[in-house]
Amino acid sequence: MKLLLKLIALTVSLSVAYATSFGMPDWCQLAYDDCKLKFEGHDNVPSFSLDGPADESFTPQIVSRNPGERIGVVTSNGIPPQFILSGYNVRPFNFYYRVPSLTLFKPYTLPHRIGSGIGHEHFDGNFARGSCIRVYITNYQLLVAENPPSVRNINLNRREALDQGKCVVFRTRH
């Protein structure tokens, strides 16, 4: 039995090394690039620690990839956060890890800013560490620099948010 486990571990290690040496895609980066939103100051998929307090943002502000579009406060309703496993292989949190909350990772308003970042509810264990996570945004404020300035509230249903790529992706540190 021990020999079989060692053989399996060796096979997995060789498979990862083989895939890496031939330039297999970084699925997390590809998912980040597909999203129409990103984190302020991050053109590549960022990595964040989960060690901070629950119920507040641990990321920078969510911004649009379109430089002419200013995003204010955002929310996410009806689409559970997803683990990006590879390519189009994703699992919602509640299915893959049987976590009771669909809002484990969700937008939180940033203090002293007109905008939001991503935070987490309180959870036990390390199940989300070292993961690639996608959070879809269904409602957001579009800040319009007119005279006078205005705010347009954009409300998307589940299908629209998915089809339009209104999401952010990040990695969690071990």
Image: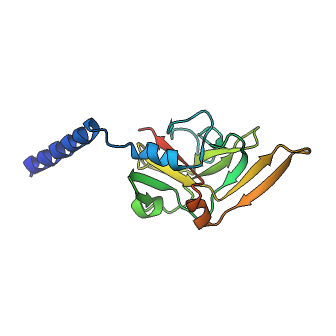
Instruction: Return the residue nearer the eye: 151 or 77.
Output: 151
Q: Which residue is drawn at 18% across and 41% down?
A: 14
Res. 31 in view: yes
Q: Where is residue 163 in the image (x, y as percent from the top left)?
A: 56, 61
On-image quarter of the C terminus: top left
Residue at left offset 59%, top offset 49%: 36
Residue 105 location, x and y as percent?
55, 52
Give above or below for 58 relative to 84. above
Q: In the picture shown, does residue 122 fall above or below 41?
A: below
Query: What colour scheme does the image use?
Result: rainbow
User: In this rendering, does residue 48 appear at all?
Assistant: no
Q: Tell me the residue at 42%/52% (across/down).
A: 84
- Image position of 75 (left or right of 127): right
How many numbered dots are placed on residues in this image? Answer: 0
Is 15 drawn above or below residue 41 in the view shown?
A: below
Q: Position of residue 161 (x, y in %)?
A: 60, 60
